[in-house]
Amino acid sequence: MGISPRRAVVRGSTTSKARPSAKKLAATKKKRVVAARSKDEDIGVAHRYFAAAPEDSRFYFRALGIRGGGAEIPPADGLPGGPPRGGETAVGEAPEDILSYGGSHQDQLQGLLAVLATQEVQESMSDCEEIMSMQSRTGVIYATTRAKRWGFKGAGDPAWGNLGQGAPETGPIGGPERSLAVELDDETNEYGDVNGRRDLRDAVAQYYNHWFRQGKKSQYTAANVAIVPGGRAGLSRLMASLHNVNVGYFLPDYTAYQQLLGEFTGVAPIAIAHDQDGLRTSPEHLRRQIQLHGLGAFLWSNPANPTGEPIEGDTLRQYVEIARQENTMMLMDEFYSHYMYEQDSSSGRPFHTLSSAEFVEDVNKDPICIVNGFTKNWRGWRCCWVVGPKHCIDVLGSIGSFMDGGTNNPLQKAAVPLLEPGFVEKDALALQAHFREKRDYMVRELEAMGIKARVPKSTFYIWADVSALPPPLNNCVVFFEYCVRHKVICVPGIFFDVNPFHRRRFHKSPYIDKLRMSYGPAWPNLKQAVKGMKEIIDLAKAGRLPPLGEPTD
């Protein structure tokens, strides 16, 4: 396999770095092997054990960042957790032994990684480099690309259980009917304004005023709204507007944030860990982190992708207050705000939803920019918006004129009726009932398989924990690789360990035993996925899990 030149990241830019000579690589490998044995005999044994493994069983080790090169180590008396070694290939005939070793001797493998983690060795490790570079794609793109290697034909393929897609089903779910007709008159055929049609901007402003700002003096108008061709387009405009700013973000969060935070040179991304169960951040912790790191902006999804954890009520009020007091621009990704499953009797709204707009005091002064749209909450259209202070929206219009050119004009016109309050209420209630049923089904099935599935309060994702599965399925990359071989797609948890510039090593990720599983697809997809995962786990429990080979072209 050919190796592309290593990319050296320098403050947001990339430059190619030439690879060292083969002689130097060989010398480096030998030095590291000797160091491994002198540091810890188990580490050396683990390295040699990998070297003797069959080629099609090595993916497990590659997922942890390990590649071969340890065959120079003299034979030892035996392998911890494996059969005695009678020769260099004695244990190479049983892939299950190798995979079991990897699952039950994580400490030795991690020790090996610590020894091998040098720039020279990384440059010589083509398989490790390939795995590390996979994080340069969003999780869904990586997952579907791998699935296509195994015959996946795209969204809607009936032979596959696609729990990887970040999109909800678009068929009937019992809500109000939608008119998909739009009159294409001369005005509609023209290019739209870069920040969107006036009638849609008015409708978006009134959506927030009606559901979140009744009785408040400061109200949103069309001047506070930019219509954008998708959520990532809106987030990209916001990122491009920042200059010399420390931007905070939570872990875990939406996989595309990695690219957003790593591609704009005016942004210095700073990861913030949650202080409550790894899922939530207290207002006090948020304030401390903003002050400690000098955060001028903060990007986060609420409700959270992938955990399904919402921040609402008094906690959200305090977040907005902190943003106002610390002068920190909150970039609020609220795309799943209609997918709320708990009862809410305190708001007075006929359906449960949330938005930071509820706690904004002055719509033109408070540093709150909200990104939302039809793609999730209304199921399907790449027509979205950014709501915020007028001066921010003016800047986004300037950026949009060269970045994306604006949103499809006929689609904007067709979308206006979807924001009418009566339609929103009926549609949201139907959506919540339908997706709650699918959520409960998936949680029940996953738990029965031995996969820990915390019940999400919102979104259409389950943050699944495979740590209790038999090795090697307790590793998210390995579990995913077996899934695609059984026509199931999910997204490994490492992709939500948002890691701009690859400054952290992904095999050290706290999400190595997590996967995001979407119950956004229609019922047949969910049932197909459950069937495939059961087959994989049953094989593992019976000790009959086959080796991980690649398809023949």
Image (tube, rainbow, N blue to C red):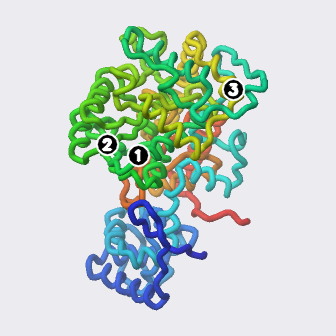
Q: Nearer the viewer, residue 460 or 281?
A: 281
Q: Name which of mark 1 and mark 2 comes first in the sequence.
A: 1
Observer able to see residue 513: no
Q: Quadrant of the C terminus?
A: bottom right
Q: Secondary structure at mark 3?
A: loop
Q: Secondary structure at mark 1?
A: loop
Q: Residue at x 49, y 73 (%)?
A: 16
Which quadrant of the view contains residue 424? top right
Residue pointed to by mark 3: 171
Q: Residue at x 53, y 33 (%)?
A: 442
Observer able to see residue 427: yes
Residue pointed to by mark 2: 296
Q: Is residue 205 left or right of residue 488?
A: left
Q: Name which of mark 1 and mark 3 comes first in the sequence.
A: 3
Which quadrant of the view contains residue 417? top right
Could you give the CA–CA distance between mark 1 and mark 3, rounded to whole angstroms? 39 Å
* Residue neighbourhood size for the residue with mark 1, other residues' Cα within 10 Å, grouped as few (<14), some (14–19), many (≥20): some
**Residue 485 at x, y percent in the picture:** 63, 54
Q: Quadrant of the N terminus?
A: bottom right
Q: Residue at x 40, y 50 (%)?
A: 511
Q: Are marks 1 and 2 in contact (CB under 8 Å)?
A: yes
Q: Nearer the viewer, residue 301 or 227?
A: 227
Point out which mark residue 242 bears: 1
Amino acid type, mark 2 = Gly
Q: Nearer the viewer, residue 240 or 113?
A: 240
Q: Residue at x 65, y 23 (%)?
A: 415
Could you give the CA–CA distance between mark 2 and mark 3, rounded to whole angstroms? 41 Å
Q: Secondary structure at mark 2?
A: strand
